[in-house]
Amino acid sequence: MTYSPELLKGTLKTIILKLLADNKKMYGYEITQKVKELTRDKIQITEGALYPTLHALETDRLVTTQTEYIGKRVRKYYSLSVAGKAKTKEKLNEITEFINTMVFLLDIKSKMA
Amino acid sequence: MTYSPELLKGTLKTIILKLLADNKKMYGYEITQKVKELTRDKIQITEGALYPTLHALETDRLVTTQTEYIGKRVRKYYSLSVAGKAKTKEKLNEITEFINTMVFLLDIKSKMA
DNA sequence: CAAATATACATAAGATTCTAATGCATTTGG
DNA sequence: CCAAATGCATTAGAATCTTATGTATATTTG
């Protein structure tokens, strides 16, 4: 990871929810690869963080799952529930506000449009 | 705190360094009040997080300290060392890159300059 | 003027959330 | 054929917070 890993803390759940909102259904390994690809290797989700988080989302009924077999190998797909979609909006609003606050507080110049 | 507290994790050291870069010398309580004021109460630094972090910065020689007495009450001022100034730049670059990555990944509309 | 609030430092227990390590099994590519 | 990739999962330990507690002085307010 390029960043100090502690910066990522608290953002993982939101990242997963956002990806599921955009992609309807994804499995764990696919999520790690998608994040790696989208961030050009800058964010690498570790399995020790990913799976417990996915299980927590399931426990909280924010996602539903369906297991498929690709040959003999299992693949567990995750999809947002209705509650999950609401939670995603909530989390995205929260992180947006947080980022705006940090940008102001730290006087960050962005390269973005 | 308005945000989920876990979002703040990893940002505290950078916030403190940035304030010290802008203000030459500050004491602990002053830092908490300045952050509260600048973020309109959205970020409240707790003492349990603040003082250990200040002590860690001192241990790492990123800040120097001087103690003053206001009447009988002690006040411990912190100032950036040369190494601390370099570290501040480093940390600000890191968090800037991180925020840019998150903005892209989560498709956030930011208010960045 | 007494009591509440604010100022100012500090530490400790416990919660949360991650990384690193480990484990198991299947599939693909050179 | 065998190393790397795919795919799931758990656990020990690290890092970084919150909440609670402790101590003391100064100021504001009813």
Image (cartoon, coloured by chain):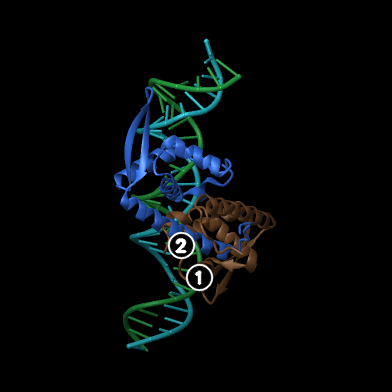
Chain colours: A blue, B brown, C green, D cyan
Q: Earlier in the sequence, mark 1 or mark 2?
A: 1
Please state the total of marks drawn on the protein image. Answer: 2
Point 46% across, 57% down: residue: A95
Pick the residue in front: A57 or B43. A57
Q: Please provide percent x and percent y for residue B41.
A: 46, 69
Q: What residue type is disc 2 on?
A: Glu
* Chain of the residue that carries numbered disc 2 in the rendered image: B
* Chain of the residue that carries numbered disc 1 in the rendered image: B
Point 58% across, 55% down: residue: B57
Q: Please provide percent x and percent y for residue C26.
A: 40, 21
Q: Please provide percent x and percent y for residue A56.
A: 34, 44
| Secondary structure category for the residue under label 2 | helix
Q: Alpha-carbon neighbours of circle 1 within 10 Å: few (<14), some, or many (≥20)?
A: some
Q: What residue type is disc 1 on?
A: Gln
Pick the residue in front: B46 or A77. A77
Front of the two marks 1 and 2? 1
Pick the residue in front: C21 or A1. A1
